[in-house]
Image (tube, coloured by chain):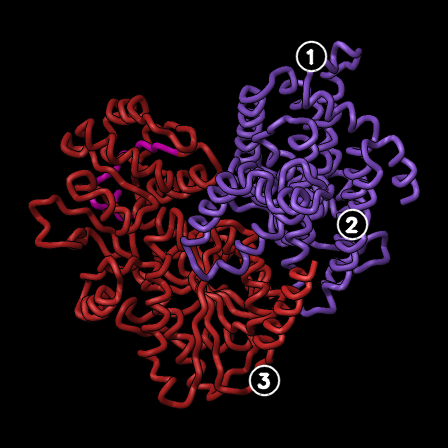
Chain colours: A purple, B red
Amino acid sequence: MSVITDNSASASSGRGVRDEMVAFVIMAALLATVPFTGIYPFFVMQALCFALFACAFNLLIGYGGLLSFGHAMFLGTAGYFTAHALKVWGVSPELGIVIGTAGACALSVVTGWISIRRQGIYFAMITLALSQLVFFVYLQTPFTHGEDGIQGIPQGMLFGLFDLSKPTILYYVILVAFLLAFLLIFRTINSPFGEVLKAIRENEPRAVSLGYKADQYKLMAFILSGTLSGLAGSLKVFVAQNASLTDVHWTMSGEIVLMALIGGLGTVFGPVVGAFIIVAMQQYLAGFGQWVTVIQGAIFVICVLTFRRGIVGEIAALFKRSL
Amino acid sequence: MNKKISALMLGTALALAVGTGAFAGDKVVKIGVLNDMSGLYADLAGPGSVIAAHMAIEDSGLTKKGWTIDVVSADHQNKPDVGVNIARQWIDVDKVDVLADVPTSSVALAVSNLVKEKNSIMLNSGAGSSDLTNKSCTPNTIHWTYDTYTLAHGTGTALTKSGGNTWFFLTADYAFGAALERDTTAAVEAAGGKVVGAVKHPLNTADFSSFLLQAQASKAKVIGLANAGGDTVNAIKQAAEFGITTGGQKLASLLMFISDVHALGLQTAKGLNLTETFYWDLNDGTRAWSKRFQDRMKNHAMPTMVQAGVYSSLLHYFKALDQLGENPHDGAKMVAKMKTMPTDDPIFGKGSIEPNGRVIHPAYLFEVKSPAESKGPWDYYKLVATIPANEAFTPLDKSTCPLLKK
């Protein structure tokens, strides 16, 4: 943590970072008490995985200004790799997570290298096209079992110590992984690297004229975002105990845009709030049947029309704080 | 932050309120109908399955004997993780005893694992995967209504025997399509027919013209559609435009339900061959039940075989409960009890449950009527052949279910 406070000197506003750290501690404390509150832990775990996914996505769009419409490919790839490693190769959970995340990292190097050469709608379309390619690969390859998915994945013992089939232990493992990844993202956006990224987002030709190699920065952000999305996908395997085509489908890429947008693009905590709202809607409104998708659509429209900065973005603007 | 805290407290209160546990040996039952309420399968399962569940409760007469039976339902959106999460919460928090329906193979297989882990019960009616009673079978799952074996063997065998002895396949290019083509080919060849060709089409194809022309040129007597959903509907519509069925070739859809025929209309679907295990106009029993069902449906749709299966499976479950006299809240024990009793209801007739969880009853090969033959709304099918129960489902000696190898 001291690393981050030290770094705040180089960040644009020290007060902003301090506010964010306070909010982070509150968030961590609230999440740590969940198992004692009677809230269903599997719901929170699922939401945490999506929150991490949304934060990773937000790193790219909120700070790099790059709208990827194919982020599901990283989530799904890592999910399939982890699931296959755990179920078929019988590796330990930590190795499974490494394999999944590394798979997503490798994929993001290739797809990033291709897609960052274009901007705006073209970038979005290239990422969408690539993710559709990846979708069809997973539809056809035998190890994913097509539309049946990989089922009944053993959770195993993390480091040989923690029994992940116990909900409370699994919850804290997921929470710690989420908080560490969140700090990494937080550290990244407040680092000199993050500042350059924001500069490129605001005015790319100017950043280039100042001597920054914009493409390299964008590629780096893309890889980081893809890898962290992969981590989210790997963690999700332990929660859901399955890996299926849903996670690579383009609608998942759309859902993550919705989560980031509702919470607030370019805010640190926005994607977390957005992810919890959307996952809660899917979970607790499931009884309303077809109305869930209608409600989601209505919220999306209301959000875009009335509070474009997202929930956290509006709160931050109201109190003139950085969140 | 205050809001967040009060939301937390509200959540806690709610969880405590619903978390009052059920005790072993009471007369309280909770049914969870988990299916697709908004997407692809909403018409063939969806809200209709919930109505079927309520009808099963009424017809069981258990409420008059002092039982309390509740039904909850939810939309799994055809996503396995959404389905598993809902199911897990139902079992853990809401104390749901039975999960019914559960269409979409990926969701069904995922829920089946969970149900075994939690020692709950799944009475599956909506999913097609024959894996549920083969390599993925569990002592907690019973599979009603149909599976891919029924569809492939019903249509393949019965159609070949009734003269359609040369086949050409239009196959969706993914695992499901390949499996359906493989199984049907085996059935056709076993019945003495011949497969003269096959063409693979990409998933979600809008233009079937080149594939249909190949099928037409093959001069095969039957064109088998080994695909699903929108692909099947597109293929059938375009086949009608090419005049394939009026030209003497038969179109056989390997995965289709009466709700799809209703959506297509008879003009387009006429002459189509398909296998189902239930049709509302089969006999007096199915007609009487279906009329009651139709009166309750908002759009006055007739029941599909999946909805009928939900009714039939729950009715059988209630009969087992009635015999036990109390709810043991023990999934494996209930399923074992259900397997010992023969199934008998006005919808599927007499049948039985195999040790692997497969429910055995007859299946029927139907041909869709032309508009001239149809006498009124929902008068869609004429019976071509009845497939006896022992031929409609995987023979027990060929089942790969691990439960059988004890």
Q: What amino acid type is highlighted by mark number 3?
A: Phe
Q: Mark 3 = which residue?
A: B23
Residue B339 percent across, percent down from the top left: 46, 73
Q: Residues within 10 Å of mark 3 (few under 14, many from 20)?
A: few
Q: Is label 2 on the same chain as label 1? A: yes
- Who's the residue at 47% across and 35% down the image? B174
Q: What amino acid type is highlighted by mark number 2?
A: Phe
Magenta stretch in the rendered image: B157-171
Q: Secondary structure at mark 2?
A: helix
- Who's the residue at 34% across and 80% down the image? B60
Q: Quadrant of the N terminus of chain A?
A: top right
- Who's the residue at 66% across and 42% down the image? A317
Query: Subunit of mark 3?
Result: B
Q: Mark 1 = which residue?
A: A205
- Real-space CA distance between mark 2 and mark 3, rounded to the nearest whole angstrom: 42 Å
Do callouts 1 and 3 mark residues in contact (Cβ within 8 Å)?
no
Disc on the earlier residue, 2 or 1: 2
Residue A284 relative to residue B187: left or right: right
The correct choice, above or below, for A187 with respect to A124 in the image is: below
Residue A281 percent across, percent down from the top left: 53, 55
Q: Is residue A194 visible?
A: yes
- Real-space CA distance between mark 2 and mark 1, rounded to the nearest whole angstrom: 34 Å
Q: Is residue A88 visible?
A: no
Q: Is label 2 on the same chain as label 3? A: no
- Between residues A257 and B248, which one lies in front from this camera angle? A257
Residue A244 percent across, percent down from the top left: 57, 44
